[in-house]
Amino acid sequence: MGRPIEYESIEDVECLHETAQAILVRVEADREVWVPKSLVSKEDSEVNAPEDLGILVVQKWFAEKEG
C-alpha cells in the first residue's frame, strides 16, 4: 500500500470559476491558480465552487509546488 495522502489548508481563498476538471481560485490579493478538482479534499475544503470563500484544502505536494 502507498502512503496516505497529505493535505494542506490555505486560508482566505476565493473560487472565481469552475470547469468540469478544475477550479480557478484567488489566493492572496493578486494571484490566481487553477486547481485540479482531483487534488481538493471534498470533505474538508470550504472552497469547491464559484463564489465560495474560505479555506481550500489541497494535496500537500500541489500546495508546495504552487507556492
Image (cartoon, grey):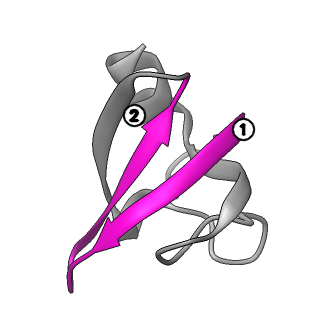
Where does residue 13 sit, x and y in percent of width and height?
A: 62, 44
Q: Is 52 within the magenta?
A: no
Q: How many marks?
A: 2
Q: Residue 62 carries which label?
A: 2
Q: Do the residues labelled 2 and 1 touch (CB within 8 Å)?
A: no
Three-letter code, disc 1: Asp
The residue where tag 1 is placed is: 12
Q: Which residue is located at x 74 percent, y 66 percent?
A: 46
Residue 18 can be seen, yes or no? yes
* Quarter of the image that includes the C terminus: top left
Q: Residue 67 carries which label?
A: none
Where does residue 29 sit, x and y in percent of width and height?
A: 52, 23
Q: What element carries label 1?
A: strand
Picture quadrant where residue 65 is located: top left
* Mark 1 neighbour class, 10 Å CA radius: few under 14, some 14 to 19, many 20 or more: few
In the figure, is residue 61 to the left or right of 21?
right
In the figure, is residue 23 to the left or right of 41?
left
Q: Which residue is located at x 75 percent, y 77 percent?
A: 43
Residue 28 vertical position relative to residue 21 in the rendered view, above or below: above
Q: Which residue is located at x 50 percent, y 51 percent?
A: 2
Mark sitting earlier along the chain (2/1): 1
Q: Distance between the residues labelled 2 and 1?
A: 17 Å
Q: Is 8 within the magenta?
A: yes
Which label sits in the foreground, 2 or 1?
A: 1
Q: Residue furthest bottom?
A: 20
